[in-house]
């Protein structure tokens, strides 16, 4: 009788162990399923931006710039580019004592993204420098537009007139069924040959 009772106890323990093992296995499977869930792209972006904001606020500009520019979202999310320009300007201002207007000018005036309040305040702080930079760049662009260049093959008639040679002293013109040919004369031995409104040869 005692043998039968002992056998039943052992059998009960074995069955109980198998049952518990099954529960543990199921629990492990559930845990694995939960832990394998990947964050969405928006969640990744938000996490990265939160980390960068903390770095910028801690004045760890270089780390913020490095993290932003190495992200796969740098080329596609405006906040990343804006924050790189902002952090770079802050870093250089801290080092040299003046802002990088060429970077700040790239930040849209109507920017409302991450750290918009701080960035707007920074832009207002350097409003005078930015205005002066815009004026200088405007003058440079105008000079480049007005800068006269030597005539070249492929230029149009208008481009030749705006070149260093300017208006010719004389024009010899020949019209055929297929083309209009002109010889522009510029003093002794200087000619520009034009066919159908385009420079095809220059003689000096």
Image (cartoon, helix red, strand yellow):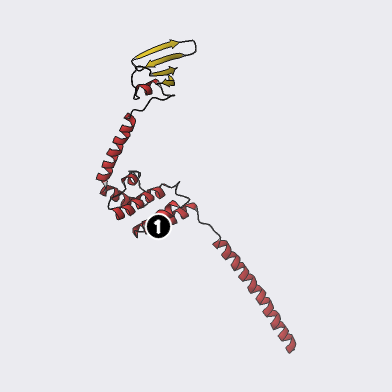
Residue farthest along the front direction in this orientation: 188
For the point 40% across and 48% down, which residue is it? 81
Residue hosting label 1: 63
Locate the N terminus and report the quarter of the image it occupies.
Answer: bottom right
Query: Height in image: 128 above or below 169?
Result: below
Q: Residue shown at 41%/11% (left/top)?
A: 173
Residue 176, percent from left and from top: 47, 10
Can residue 55 be seen in the rendering of this structure?
yes
The percent position of residue 149, horizontal first and vertical second, equals 36, 28
Left or right, 166 with reference to 66: left
Residue 115 in view here = no
Please state the horizontal and vertical placement of residue 196, each as a whole percent of the image: 45, 17
- Picture layout, residue 105 above or below residue 6: above
Q: Residue at x 30, y 38 (%)?
A: 137
When asked about the image quadrant of residue 150, the answer is top left
Q: Residue at x 71, y 80 (%)?
A: 11
Q: Nearer the viewer, residue 200 or 88?
A: 200
The quadrant of the rendering that contains the C terminus is top left
Name the outermost residue toward the bottom: 2
Q: Tell me which corner region of the image, top left, top right, bottom left or bottom right, holds residue 152.
A: top left
Question: Can you give x and y, in whole percent of width and height, for residue 31 in the image?
Answer: 57, 65
Judging depth in this view, the residue of 121 and 36 nearest the camera is: 121
**36 left or right, relative to 176:** right
Q: Secondary structure at mark 1?
A: helix
Q: Is residue 28 above or below residue 143?
A: below
């Amino acid at each position: 009788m005692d043998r039968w009772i002992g056998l039943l106890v052992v059998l009960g323990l074995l069955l109980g162990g198998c049952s518990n093992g099954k529960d543990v296995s199921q629990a492990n499977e559930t845990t694995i399923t939960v832990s394998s869930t990947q964050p969405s792209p928006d969640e990744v972006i938000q996490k990265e931006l939160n980390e960068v904001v903390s770095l910028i606020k801690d004045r760890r500009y270089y780390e913020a710039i490095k993290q932003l520019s190495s992200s796969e979202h740098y080329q596609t999310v405006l906040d990343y580019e804006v924050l790189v320009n902002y952090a770079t300007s802050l870093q250089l201002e801290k080092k040299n004592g003046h802002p990088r207007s060429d970077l700040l000018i790239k930040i849209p005036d109507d920017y409302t993204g991450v750290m918009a309040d701080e960035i707007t305040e920074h832009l207002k702080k350097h409003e005078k420098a930015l205005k002066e930079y815009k004026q200088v760049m405007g003058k440079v662009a105008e000079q480049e537009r007005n800068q006269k260049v030597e005539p070249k093959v492929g230029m149009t008639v208008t481009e030749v007139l705006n070149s260093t040679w300017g208006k010719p002293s004389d024009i010899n013109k020949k019209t055929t069924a297929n083309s209009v040919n002109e010889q522009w004369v510029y003093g002794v031995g200087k000619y520009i040959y034009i066919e159908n409104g385009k420079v095809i040869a220059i003689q000096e």
